[in-house]
Image: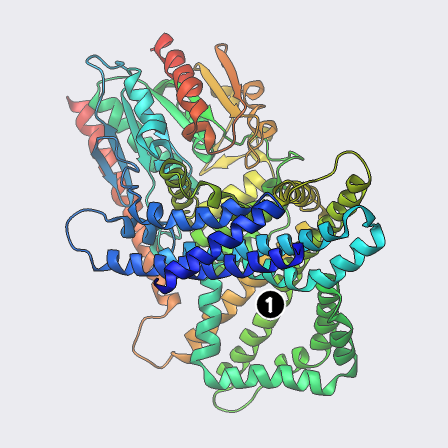
Amino acid sequence: MSKTGTIVSEAADAFKMYESAVGSAMTYGEKLLKGTEVFTKLDCDDINKTPKDLALRMDKVQIFHYRPMVKKPSSIPVLIVYALMNKQYIMDIQPDKSFVKKLLELGQDVYIVDWGYPTDADRYITTEDYIEGYLGDAVDFIREKHALPAINLLGKCQGGTFSAIYTSLHPEKIKNLVTIAAPFDFAIEDGLLFKWSKYINIDLLVDSFGVLPGDFLNNTFIMLSPYNLAVGKYINIVNSFDDPKALGEFLRMEKWLFDCPNQAGENYRTWMKDLWQENKLIKGEFVLGDKKIDLKNITVPVLNVYGLKDNLIPASSSKPLLSFIGSKDKEEASFPVGHAGIVAGTLSQKEIAPKIAAWLKERS
Amino acid sequence: MTGQVYEKFFEAQKSLFDEWQKNMQASFKKFAGDSGEGEKPSDFYKKAFESPQDFMKKIAESTEVYQSLFELWKKLSEGGAKLDAKTAGAIYDAWAGRFFTLLHNAFVPSVPAFMQKFAEIFVSKLESSDKVLSDNYKNLFAADEQLRTAWFNSLDKGPKGYIDFLEVFRKVYDETAGKAAKAPTFGKDMDVWKSRQAVMDSWIKYNIASNRFYAALAEIAGEATKKALNDYVEMCAGDNKIKTFEEFYKYWSKTVSATYDKVLFSDEVSMLAGNMVDEMAKFRAEFDRFFELSFASLPIPKKSDMDDLYATVYELKKEVRALRKEIRNLAGAKS
């Protein structure tokens, strides 16, 4: 018998003895062994693969247009605006959990912003450049292409905050606004990021780094739940080592979690100081460039979606939006999901994307 | 008999895990040698983690924590119905040391990679700095009775002892080597020398701040484990007895996570996190300054030169975008 064979055989005997004596944990070792084969044969080459075309490029920012999946898609396209802090492909993480694909199947005509990966050369990009520059140009491009006065905007997380700010400045260019798990009230008590952000010297951080490394964000997110994210989940995943589907889903999510882009310093300074530390947006004190932002200027229909299990952007931060805007047609929808699951989980397929598609359809 | 079974189980699990790692490495070597178009599975893992081995390392580290907990549970369950709080406490004390080391190993890779890289460059590439750095530590230890005492007192006290030691270290450092780092410099390379001292000073302070933070995380896990243990003893005496290790692990991890959720919100831990980030930023600034000065005479662009260039390019790009918009608007108005 080979050396490996002997070890496996001895292990099997020991596990049997152990099982008869204790009756648990044996499967952990077995699953590790089985996982070798599953792991190496796993094919995860289906992230961000819903067919799309590059519609516009502005520096490192790209706007993609997904190929419609129904004969007659909605006449008002929707532009998805994701956060700068993570990558937008969570919305298309795998075919059976793709939020984008679901919207397409339900008749939406979908565009998406890919903010790119900032490098040292991008340290001076401001919040105004992102919102009025890149996002504004993308909205104008789509309006012109479709010969429309206004399009739909769907913003996730920071992208939702950006979308609301843009809509308050240009309500005539936006037909409907959807925000998903977006922060608006930054003075909440139940969000760890919100608490820690008050203890950081943002000027020192930005002046020292220029462009904030994405790795800094990766590690910050891990520290929000250190045992679960640094240890516990790697113990738990072994239980799924013999299940290609579960292991594949775990690895796709790991790839996304550890793919935080660098952050342009000047934007990060404004975002963290004016919003996270001083909560200027809902106080009506936030100034973008030379324009004061008044959320009351948002008069278009608004759907505010948030997750009740979101520990990154808790519901308490997202929920207040509707009380600060001027829209008459406004609605909120909450679901028992977390920050990623809201666009990449089972419920997002069954309920959240259908809810948003139906809401947009009624108003387009 | 049960004890022998456990020993056998552990030996077997360890051998199996080693073998598993070897097999995985061999498999990935095979992938690395594959040719053909499109993204290979190995490419995916390279993107997801720094390397497939990185993922295996995370699994291996986590498995060690899991096994360590298994050892704890094994010792507790051997006590059977006779287990009381005092015995459980003694078992915990004897067990905790290795657990903290494992937990520390699992958390420390969370120190941002760019910081690890800077430290690596600074310490390994600049031999003289390395020597000064280690001499500073050596001198500190040799000269200060208070520090030596604090170190020996901390040895068997887990994270709490380490935190106490760090406090003494910081105080002694500020009064000795820290002061020396700020002493006036002279000679033709005085600016470089002064900057080198400042980098070392900021590096030591960053280390104190980050160690303080990670030790606090380990301390929280230790306190939560003690609570889980007390609950376990109570459950053993009552009807809700935990029967298997899986049940014990689930209960323990739930307790630890709940404790983290609560304690991380405290002002004290928030301040530690903020302080760690501030010290990291100071180190980065000093590091850049040191390199600028060190290579000032070489005909290569420095970071500050590049920042000037980036600022100019940024302004130009912005202007071009605005002009394009203006042209588009004018063209639209004409038609």
Residue A268: tell me if it is visible: yes
Residue that protrudes farthest toward the top in the picture:
A362
Q: At 53% across and 47% down in the image, what residue appears?
A: A26
Q: At 63% across and 81% down in the image, what residue appears?
A: B137
Query: In the picture, which quadrant includes the C terminus of chain A?
Result: top left
Secondary structure, mark 1, is helix
Q: Is residue B218 left or right of residue A358?
A: right
Judge by depth and name the residue closer to the eye, B164 or B184. Answer: B164
Judge by depth and name the residue closer to the eye, A353 or A327. Answer: A353
Judge by depth and name the residue closer to the eye, A289 or A165. Answer: A165
Residue density around tag 1, few if under 14, some if 14–19, many if 20 or more, within 10 Å: some
Q: At 66% across and 57% down in the image, what residue appears?
A: B3
Which amino acid type is shown beneath numbered disc 1?
Answer: Asn
Q: Position of residue A50 (x, y in %)?
A: 25, 31
- According to the image, what is the colour scheme of the structure? rainbow
Q: Position of residue B46 (x, y in %)?
A: 32, 54
Chain letter of disc 1? B
Q: Position of residue B306 (x, y in %)?
A: 34, 63
B284 lies above or below B297: above
Q: Position of residue A123 (x, y in %)?
A: 40, 53
Judge by depth and name the residue closer to the eye, B232 or B148. Answer: B232
Q: Is residue A234 left or right of residue B232?
A: left
B304 lies above or below A280: below
A200 lies above or below B281: above
Q: Is residue A320 left or right of residue A64?
A: right
Q: Is residue A356 left or right of residue B63?
A: left
Q: Which residue, given by chain and number where applicable, does mark 1 sit on?
A: B207
